[in-house]
Image (spheres, helix red, strand yellow):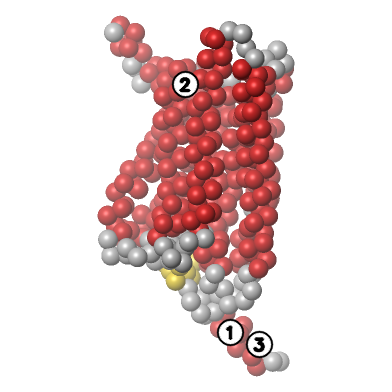
C-alpha cells in the first residue's frame, strides 16, 4: 500500500466535526445580534402558524390560492427552523461545534426549503395566471387535486435534485482546517475546507441554481407578463384594479425573494474583501422572508385580514366602529 495514501486517509479521519465561528470580523459582539434575530424567528413562527390556523378554520379561505399560501407558511417555518436554533445556540451558549452528518443534513435542508419556496411561488404565479387570463376554465383546472399534485411534484423535484449537494460534500476529504467563518453550514463554505478538488461541487451548485430557481424565476415572470398584458386589456377600471391588487402581494414577495438570491450571489464574489456582508445577508435571507411573508399577505389581502380578525375575536369590534 502507498504510504502517502494511508497518511492521507488517516488524516482525513481526524476531523469529526466542524466549528461554526459565527459572523466573521465581529465575533466579540455578535451576541448582540441574537435579540433581533430571535424576535424575527419568533415572529416568523407565530405569524405563519396564525396563517395556517386561519386558513384551516375560515371556510371562505378554502380555495387553491390560500392552500398554496398555507403550504408556503409551512416551508417558511421549516426554512427558519433549519438555521435559527443553531445560530442562537452559537450566540448564547458558544455551541459552535457541529458534527459532519448534522452539517450535511443542514446543507440539504437549506437547499431543499429554498428551492421549495421558489417552487411554491411558481405554483402561486400559475394559479393567478389561470385565474386572470382564463377565468372560465379556472374552477375546472385549479382544483384541490391540482394543488395536491403540484405540491407533490415540487416536493419530489426539490427533494431529489438537492440530494447530490450534501452527498458530494460528504465525499470530500476534510483533513486539516475545520473552522467555518459562518453561522450555518453553507455548501461552498464547507467544501472550501476540503483537501481535495471541489470542482464537481461547484459545478453541481451552479447547475442546480439554473435548473430549479433559475427556471422558476423565468416562468414566474413570464406568467406575470402575461397577466399584466391581460389586465391592461380589461375595459373595466374596477376589474383591472382588483386583478392588480390580487397579484401585488405575490409579486412583492417574489421580487424580494429572488432579489435576495441575486444579491447573495453578487456579494459572494466579494467575500474575501468583506466576508461579513455575504454571511450576514445569507442569514437574513433565510429568516426575513418567513417573517415578512405573513405580514405582506395580511396587509394586502382583505379576506385573510378578515379571517385573522374573526379568529382573534376582533371582527365584532371592527364592525361596530
Which of marks 3 and 1 precedes in the sequence? Answer: 3
Q: Is residue 106 above or below residue 171?
A: above
Secondary structure at badge 2 equals: loop
In the visual, does 249 lie left or right of 4? Answer: left
State the residue at coordinates (69%, 92%): 2
Q: Which mark is residue 280?
A: none
Q: Nearer the viewer, residue 100 or 281?
A: 281
Residue at the (67%, 43%) spot, across then down = 215
For the residues marked 1 and 3, what is the alpha-carbon distance in whole angstroms?
9 Å
Q: Position of residue 151 (x, y in %)?
A: 64, 35
| Of pointers 3 and 2, the one earlier in the residue sequence | 3
- Please identify, in this view, whether the residue under mark 1 or under mark 2 is nearer the observer: 2
Q: Is residue 295 left or right of residue 154?
A: left
Quarter location, residue 68: top right
Residue 5's disc number? 3
- Write the residue at 53% across / 72% down: 193
Residue 319, x across and y down, in percent: 34, 8
The numbered dot on residue 301 is 2
Q: Secondary structure at mark 3?
A: helix
Residue receiving disc 1: 10
Residue 300 in view in this figure: yes
The residue carrying pointer 2 sits among few (fewer than 14), some (14 to 19) or many (20 or more) residues within 10 Å by Cα, namely some
Amino acid at each position: 500500500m502507498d504510504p502517502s495514501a494511508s497518511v492521507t486517509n488517516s488524516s482525513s479521519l481526524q476531523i469529526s466535526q466542524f466549528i461554526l465561528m459565527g459572523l466573521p470580523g465581529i465575533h466579540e459582539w455578535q451576541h448582540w445580534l441574537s435579540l433581533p434575530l430571535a424576535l424575527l424567528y419568533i415572529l416568523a413562527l407565530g405569524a405563519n402558524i396564525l396563517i395556517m390556523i386561519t386558513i384551516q378554520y375560515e371556510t371562505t379561505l378554502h380555495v387553491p390560492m390560500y392552500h398554496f399560501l398555507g403550504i408556503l407558511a409551512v416551508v417558511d417555518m421549516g426554512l427558519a427552523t433549519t438555521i435559527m436554533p443553531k445560530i442562537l445556540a452559537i450566540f448564547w451558549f458558544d455551541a459552535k461545534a457541529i458534527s459532519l452528518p448534522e452539517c450535511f443534513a443542514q446543507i440539504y435542508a437549506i437547499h431543499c426549503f429554498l428551492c421549495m419556496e421558489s417552487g411554491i411561488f411558481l405554483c402561486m404565479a400559475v394559479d393567478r395566471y389561470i385565474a386572470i387570463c382564463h377565468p372560465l376554465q379556472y374552477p375546472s383546472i385549479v382544483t384541490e387535486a391540482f394543488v395536491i399534485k403540484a405540491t407533490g411534484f415540487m416536493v419530489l423535484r426539490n427533494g431529489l435534485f438537492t440530494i447530490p449537494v450534501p452527498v458530494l460534500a460528504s465525499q470530500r476529504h476534510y483533513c486539516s482546517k475545520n473552522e467555518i467563518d459562518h453561522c450555518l453550514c453553507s455548501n461552498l463554505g464547507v467544501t472550501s475546507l476540503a483537501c481535495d478538488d471541489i470542482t464537481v461541487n461547484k459545478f453541481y451548485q451552479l447547475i442546480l441554481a439554473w435548473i430549479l430557481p433559475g427556471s422558476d424565476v423565468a416562468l414566474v415572470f413570464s406568467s406575470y407578463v402575461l397577466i399584466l398584458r391581460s389586465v391592461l386589456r380589461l375595459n373595466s377600471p374596477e376589474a383591472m384594479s382588483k386583478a392588480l391588487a390580487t397579484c401585488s402581494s405575490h409579486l412583492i414577495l417574489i421580487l424580494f425573494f429572488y432579489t435576495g438570491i441575486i444579491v447573495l450571489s453578487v456579494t459572494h464574489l466579494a467575500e474575501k474583501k468583506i466576508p461579513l456582508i455575504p454571511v450576514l445577508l445569507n442569514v437574513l435571507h433565510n429568516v426575513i422572508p418567513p417573517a415578512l411573508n405573513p405580514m405582506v399577505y395580511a396587509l394586502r389581502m382583505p379576506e385573510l385580514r378578515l379571517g385573522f380578525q374573526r379568529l382573534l375575536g376582533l371582527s365584532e369590534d371592527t364592525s361596530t366602529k
